[in-house]
Amino acid sequence: EVQLVESGGGLVKPGGSLRLSCAASGFTFSNAWMSWVRQAPGKGLEWVGRIKSKTDGGTTDYAAPVKGRFTISRDDSKNTLYLQMNSLKTEDTAVYYCTTAVRESSSPGIYFDYWGQGTLVTVSS
Amino acid sequence: DIQMTQSPSTLSASVGDRVTITCRASQSISSWLAWYQQKPGKAPKLLIYKASSLESGVPSRFSGSGSGTEFTLTISSLQPDDFATYYCQQYNSYSLFTFGPGTKVDIK
């Protein structure tokens, strides 16, 4: 059974930093493309960023609102995905979901098949 | 950037109703569209990918159709477990993936 368990959320002041973790199990993590998706309170879903498997280059892409402030990384030896968030803003307040990312052989992009339960990040003074 | 819209934003329906939700893209996305269901306080769940492919384990009352810029999610006979918010998501881009604003299906 695929399991994704996020941790590391909490209250942080504007301008502060936080690192989220996502512990994965039930699948071959090293082969998986992974992503973070967030949801502000009472709002819709927003893609944050994606990391490819090391076999596919291990590269990352980010949504414009977080580019340059957030960094996604992975430790395949620990089956863990990370989201380093710096220079946090009040508008980054959201539940952050870790997801597996599916890329079909002929598709340009990805969709998200397995999701964690989410971890809440609150940015407030 | 590709923008996604959904209509209606809220839909009131009864158990047994046939329900249709529409998702539109600001430019052609071929069939690179997924649909998700989200219940309050829970993570989203994948229902449909590639516009019309049903994810394993999802009931057959859910179906998707469309291509290009207009897509629909249909629930053939609404069940009590289906009251939720539904999101579409395009993946026509290599590095930017956008969701629609959501359609809430509630009890009439």
Image (cartoon, rainbow, N blue to C red):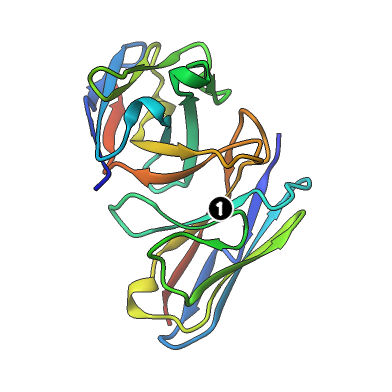
Furthest-bottom residue in this view: B16
- Residue in the picture at 47% in, 75% down: B60
Query: Which residue does the numbered mark 1 point to in the structure image?
Result: B34
Query: Is A117 above or below relative to A23?
Result: below
Which of the 4 quarters of the picture holds residue A41?
top left
Q: Percent x, y for residue A88?
A: 38, 17
Task: Name the residue nearer the viewer: B33 or A107.
Answer: A107
Q: Position of residue B51 (x, y in %)?
A: 62, 58
| Element under disc 1 | strand
- Classify B60 as above or below A17: below
Residue density around tag 1, few if under 14, some if 14–19, many if 20 or more, within 10 Å: many
Decide if residue A80 is on the left or right side of residue A104.
Answer: left
Q: How many marks?
A: 1
What residue sits 47% from the left and 29% below the top? A48
Q: Where is residue A90, by image quadrant?
A: top left
Name the spot of residue A3 as percent of width and height, x first: 24, 42
Q: Residue at x 61, y 36 (%)?
A: A109
Towards the viewer: B103 or B93: B93
Which quarter of the rendered picture does the C terminus of chain A lie within?
Answer: top left
Chain under numbered label 1: B
Q: Tell me which amino acid carries mark 1.
A: Ala
Q: Position of residue A71 (x, y in %)?
A: 42, 14
| Near-viewer residue (A36 or B52) | B52
Left or right? Give the position of B50 relative to B76: right
